[in-house]
Image (tube, coloured by chain):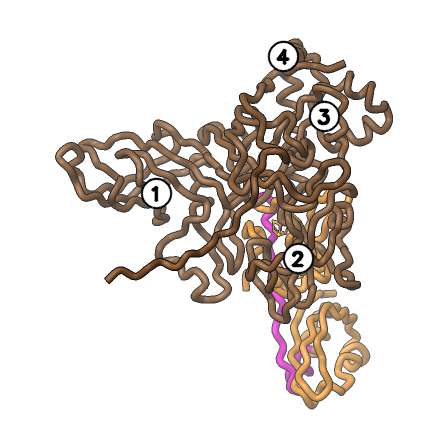
Amino acid sequence: MQKKRVVFNYPSHLVDQPVISKLVKDYDLTVNILRARITPKEEGRLVLEMEGKRAALEAGLNYMKEIGVDVQSLAQDVKWYEDRCTHCTACISVCHPQALDVNRKTMEVSFNRDKCIACELCIPVCPYQAMEILF
Amino acid sequence: MAKTIEEINEKIRRGKAVVLTAEEIIDYAAEKGVKKTAQDVDVVTTGTFGPMCSSGAYFNVGHSKPRIKLGGGKTYLNDVPVYTGLAAVDFFLGATAMPEDDPRNKIYPGKFSYGGAHIIEELVAGKDVRLTATAYGTDCYPRKSLETYISLKDMNEAVLFNMRNAYQNYNVAVNLSDRMIYTYMGVIQPKLGNANYCNAGQLSPLLNDPYYKTIGIGTRIFLGGGVGYVVGSGTQHNPDVKRTEKGVPKMTSGTLAVKGDLKMMSSKWLKGTSYTGYGVTLTVGIGVPIPILNEEILQYTMIRDEEIWAQVIDYSDAYPQFIPGSLGEVNYKQLKSGKITVQDREVPTAGLSSYLKAGEIARILKEWIETGKFFLTQPVELLPSVDSGIAFKSLKERPIKKRH
Ligand code: SF4
Ligand code: SF4
């Protein structure tokens, strides 16, 4: 089994097509949507995590490309420099997936990479250059 | 029974002083009662670790051979200009100074990734910086240019001197407009998308001594990981504001001016800080010990987050246009919970001042006192309080007459 995080950019004519369910059914993939911005009759953008057999993953991604979806892989290289982090909590209100989260009792900040969708919103917000995304 | 600073210092000397942090004192006093606690506890330690723009450091770099007079010319540390309007080899580096070729906000929002504050952090970390200067030359100081590496240990003096630190309470910043704004209170999302606050609340130094009954000129403090002193009230010190029944200001109020030997400090507690779209600033760690001289002073230190209120201010219009008025009051318990209500809407909060690190500072100072490394001082004069007659002025502009 393999995991892959990708960003799908949909052209407008595909927005109302059940493409994701096709990935699940025909390619036997587990799909976890991390972020979605789809408006009817416009373009769509999906950030998701896919899990499945290596060959099935590849075939599924090829299928998406064939039908006209732009596929990009999501950078895994989001870095939280713990030594630079002052635990100020400035980033907490912009990190919607709660990859950057704070323990409200101790006010200690932590970073959970698995929840990060690389939206980059924390980058301009962090005053200590503690967050970095390498594409 | 009242205590004196001398008596407390004697206990510190004997390793017998009872020291609690401003957080610990709350539950301790609630359990033991005010009377008993005031007898038992000698010192309450406070802390704050937040961005403080009116910070800087002055240096004496020693005379070169042949000599150079930096004053009247141009001097830089790592391309950041310093102020040289002083004697030959003294200069001042401001925290918010930045390289002349930094694009500022020309590419909006600017990154402001490097400036005076970062140099202070690097120097304190023991790093070399580039000192470059040009001068006009005199008979006694003939040299006209200088280029050398320099580090803190090469200098005669290196002194952190901050003219306004440790603000007693601060605004909560929101944005009512429909575009993102970039401020000294951080990035604020449009349409009440978030609310940023900047104070350590119940751990904050001046909120634990709201009328400045123990803090004044000469108060020895934790400063940037070393030892420093309060040299007076800071700029914009404004004690006579709206206060709660317990005397805690409900808005920006008192401030401290502080100094200390930079060579004894640590880069852990002096951090170069970059506010996108705003500029560079220095995050300073400060801890002030409050001697528990009597029950009244103890009661001030028992203040809790839910008893400290701050004003919610719109930074898209009211603040920049200097229009007075608040969108409401919230307390630090609400702010730290992650959500407040403004104009009937739930707004997520984010801090700029680190409560975690403020607590660490209060604990370090506590440990210094417990182990006899740090003694309290009797201030020469207390900070001006509500009866001082200080009135906060805004700038009255007067048109300059054109001369012909
Ligand atoms: S990039 Fe930053 S804000 Fe976005 S999800 Fe990751 S940690 Fe959170
Ligand atoms: S904004 Fe930066 S320094 Fe502050 S808590 Fe987040 S990662 Fe840490």
A32, above or below B8, in the image: below
| Sequence order check, earlier mark of 1 and 3 | 1
Q: Amino acid at mark 1?
A: Tyr
Whether A67 is among the magenta residues is yes
Q: Which mark is residue B6?
A: 4
Q: Which sits in the foreground, B162 or A88?
A: B162
Give the magenta range: A61-83
| Sequence order check, earlier mark of 4 and 2 | 4
Determine whether, in the image, residue B374 is placed left or right of residue B131.
right
| Sequence order check, earlier mark of 3 and 4 | 4
| Sequence order check, earlier mark of 2 and 1 | 1
Q: Which sits in the foreground, B136 or B307?
A: B307
Whether B209 is among the magenta residues is no
Determine whether, in the image, residue B200 is placed left or right of residue B338.
left
Chain for disc number 1: B
Q: Position of residue A114 (x, y in %)?
A: 71, 58
Image quarter for residue B392? top right
Circles 1 and 4 on the same chain:
yes
Image quarter for residue A7? bottom right
Q: Colour of chain B?
A: brown
Question: Mark 3 — residue?
Answer: B297
